[in-house]
Image (cartoon, grey):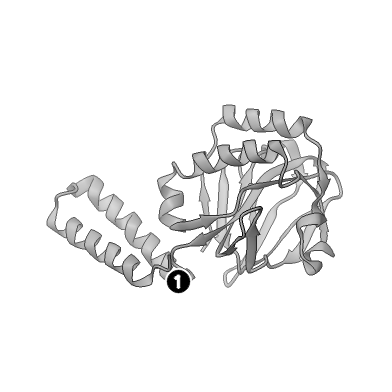
Amino acid sequence: MLIAVPKVLTKDQVRACRKVTDDAKWIDGRATAGPQAAAVKQNLQLPDNSPEAHQLGDMVLEALFKSPLFVSFALPHRVLPPMFNRYGTGQFFGSHVDAAIRGIPNSGVRIRTDISVTLFLAEPTEYDGGELCVLDSYGTHEIKLAAGDAVLYPATSLHHVKPVTRGFRVASFFWIQSMVRDERARTMLFDMDQTIQRLTSTLGLENAEVVKLSGIYHNLIRYWADT
């Protein structure tokens, strides 16, 4: 399942991010790619250990964890620190599947990459091309969101970024290990949680059926959670 999370960052926060990225020193994006991905990757990245990456990463995660929609969908357990990339004219990222396991820098901790996240930092009018294309059983989804919006999709998905033909595509990208490993289980839990929230808004928190359904939801998390 793929989902867009709107307005993770405010426009003021996006402008603050872009001020940092516009002045930053970028490196070849292939430095953080595996052999297969590196063969089809042409973009630039902020160095993982740079002050700019840490500063902006903290801003992104703080904002993202304030989004109930994000938490409901991802059920996050561990999050890889956000990274940042830029595509200029002619740059692209060919079809690939993200690595299953990634290490959190300087921690000795490794995470299973269940969910991939892209947070857009450039408005769609700033560049041509550069669509994120995610392939699933329903076909190919082309994604190009407003600056400050994020998209979450299964890290198991085959995906690519189309060549940029004008301007610069700037984004943050990272991965999440969910408390619930199984994608189908996460989807059912997300649907149930969204239903509970809608029922709560009309019937109230103390409604007996809402309370019962909430109990079922949390017991299913207990059953499926891997923490």
Q: Position of residue 79 (x, y in %)?
A: 55, 54
Residue 141, above or below 9:
below
Q: How many marks?
A: 1
In depth, the one of 34 and 5 nearer the eye is 34
Check disc 1 and give the amino acid type. Answer: Arg
Q: Is residue 141 visible?
A: no
Residue 66 lies left or right of residue 103; in this view the side is left
Give the percent coordinates (x, y) of residue 150: 57, 47
Residue 104 at least partly seen: yes
| Residue 18 to residue 67: above or below | above
Q: Quadrant of the C terminus?
A: bottom left
Q: Position of residue 193 (x, y in %)?
A: 33, 57
Badge 1 marks a residue whose secondary structure is: helix
- 42 left or right, relative to 104: right
In the picture, measured across the screen, residue 83 lies left or right of residue 164, that is left
Which residue corresponds to mark 1?
184
Q: Nearer the viewer, residue 153 or 219?
A: 219
